[in-house]
Structure formats: structure tokens, C-alpha cells
Amino acid sequence: MACRKEHKNVDLVVKDLPINQGGIGRHKCAACAYEKGFESGKKHIDSFDIKDFIKNLPESQKGLRRHRDPIEAYELGFYHGQVEASKHLTIKDKKGISFSMRNFGLSIIAKGILNVIKEDNLPYEHALGAINVAHGFEILIKARIVEQHPLLIFDKSLNNEKIKKGKDLEFQDLLDNGRTIDYSKLPYQLWAVTGYVLKDEKLFKDFGLIRNQIIHFHAPLSLSLPELTFKYSFTLIEKAINEWWNKSIFEYIKVFDRDAYKEIFNKLDKLEIIVSYQYHKTKGFEKIND
């Protein structure tokens, strides 16, 4: 069944969501999914069979919604519906805040990886890629913590005196008057809040120092930034997001460059880095069956 709705306004909302051309979401109308999510969010309907709903959605490959992930569209609509109903209260916004941070962080990481696989290495291309990947993971860790409570990513320097008492505390109040936890303190905060321990905390710390060196001084000349960035991305970040959200960096790489998969998987093989996905000639990548 084909979708016959125009969805002009909704298309502008879902146009930047990740692409999905596989599974039950293939060719389904992301705009319809967003509208249903918005409706559920406004009514705070949590007990909903999202997969069954997606399966029965009308199909659509029109305009800006073409190939957009309907599950992501539903989740975004749900968040916007909650915001509409709750007037942006910070605690009620935590799912939506985390969702936005997650998509932004993964997009930055995907872009950074594409920077470091370039062989011509335009001036500081690899260094900029490393910065993006480290910054992206910092955002993802904070997104995971925000799922528990947005205040937990801020340190004690939050200036309460500047926030008017008696008003609803909004996330923007925290951004305007507080300071988020430093990169170096994130592994402990992540463990304390969620119980998750990073697979290689030393790698996290060392890569953070490299990022600081690049930001404040210059790119290191004695290190292979592509190799280090791949190791950081696929032994640390990929493992974490697989467990946290059943997500993969590969899902976001395809948004920017679908032709990069072969080169990425060849580099992973060369570095003997094992991931849960493999190269697929037509799809680009596919999950390895256990």
C-alpha cells in the first residue's frame, strides 16, 4: 500500500534522519511514522509495538522522506510529542535530549572516519578526523548518562543563582549556566551512573590527550592518526553503542558516503580489528550472524 499523503512539513523534519534500506523499515513512509510517534508522545503512550506498526506502514519513496529510517522517525516524533505536552521540562525531555545527542555524535564520528581513510591526506585532514571522532564519542557518553538524568553530565560549577527559582528548569538553563564534565572524568561518571565500564580506558585517555594536543598545539608527526582513530572507533566506540542502543557506526557512514565501505572493511582487516559487521557488495554492510 502506497502513502498518498503530501507530508510537506513533516518531510522537512525527517529529511536528516539516518537512511535505512533493509529489514522491516525498507521503503516505509518515515513521515507517517513520525506523525504516529508525535501522537504517541503527546499522549505518553509507552506500551506500543513499534515493529508491528512499522511493518504495516504504507510505503513511500517520495521526496525528502525517501529511504529515511521509519523507526528513527517514530522516535523523533515521540520526542517532539512529549515536548509539546511537557513544555520542555528538563527531566521529561531526557529521552529527546539523549536522542538528539546520539544522532549528532554518531554523525560526527562517521564524518571523522571518512576523513582519516583519505590517502591523499589534504592538510590536516587526518587530524581533523581524529578530533571529530573523539568529540563525537564524548557526546555519546554524555547522551548515555543523560538517559538517567540531564543534571548528571554537569559538574558542581552549575551556577544556581542565575536560574530563577519557581520556574520550570529547562535544559537550556543548564547549558547557559553550567559546565559539563570534562572528557577525562567521563569514564568514572559513566560507570557510576550506568554501570558500564569502557572496554579500554587507557585507549580512551591516550586518544583524549592526542585530541588535546591537536586542538591546542599541532598534529603529532610521529603517530599514525588513521590507525589510532580506527582502533579508537571500532574497538571502543562501536562496542559501546552496540551494547547501549544496538546501533553501529556503519549506519551513519552510509549517510555521507555509501562507496566507502569496502575501503573501511579492508582497513579493519589489515588492522585485525573484529567487528559485528562485514562488507556486503550491494548493501555496503551487513550484520554477522552469531
Image: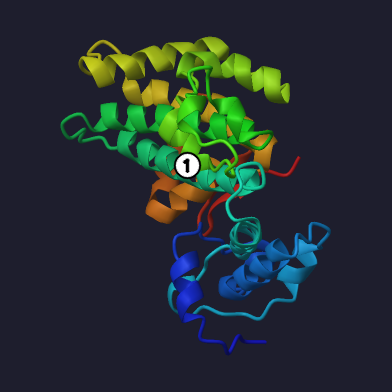
Of 127 and 86, the residue lying toward us: 86
Q: Is residue 270 visible?
A: no
Q: Seen from this angle, which residue lies furthest right?
A: 47
Relative image position of residue 139 (x, y in whole percent): 49, 33
Where, quadrant-wise, is the N terminus in this rendering?
Answer: bottom right
Of 115 and 208, the residue lying toward us: 208
Q: Which residue is mark 1?
A: 172
* Disc 1 secondary structure class: helix
Asked if residue 216 is positioned above or below residue 237 in the image, the reply reads above
Three-letter residue code for mark 1: Gln
Asked if residue 217 is positioned above or below residue 36 in the image, the reply reads above
Tell me the residue at 76%/63% (across/down). 51
Q: Seen from this angle, which residue lies furthest bottom?
A: 4
Relative image position of residue 210 (x, y in whole percent): 35, 15
Q: Is residue 279 visible?
A: yes
Q: Quadrant of residue 145?
A: top right
Asked if residue 194 is positioned above or below residue 258 in the image, the reply reads above
Tell me the residue at 57%/64% (across/down). 21
Where, quadrant-wise, is the C terminus in this rendering?
Answer: top right
Relative image position of residue 50 (x, y in whole percent): 75, 63
Question: Is residue 37 left or right of 137 when viewed as pictured?
Answer: right
Question: Is residue 117 left or right of 37 when viewed as pictured?
Answer: left
Q: How many marks?
A: 1
Tell me the residue at 58%/70% (across/down). 30
Of 216 and 237, the residue lying toward us: 216
- Judging from the image, the colouring scheme is rainbow
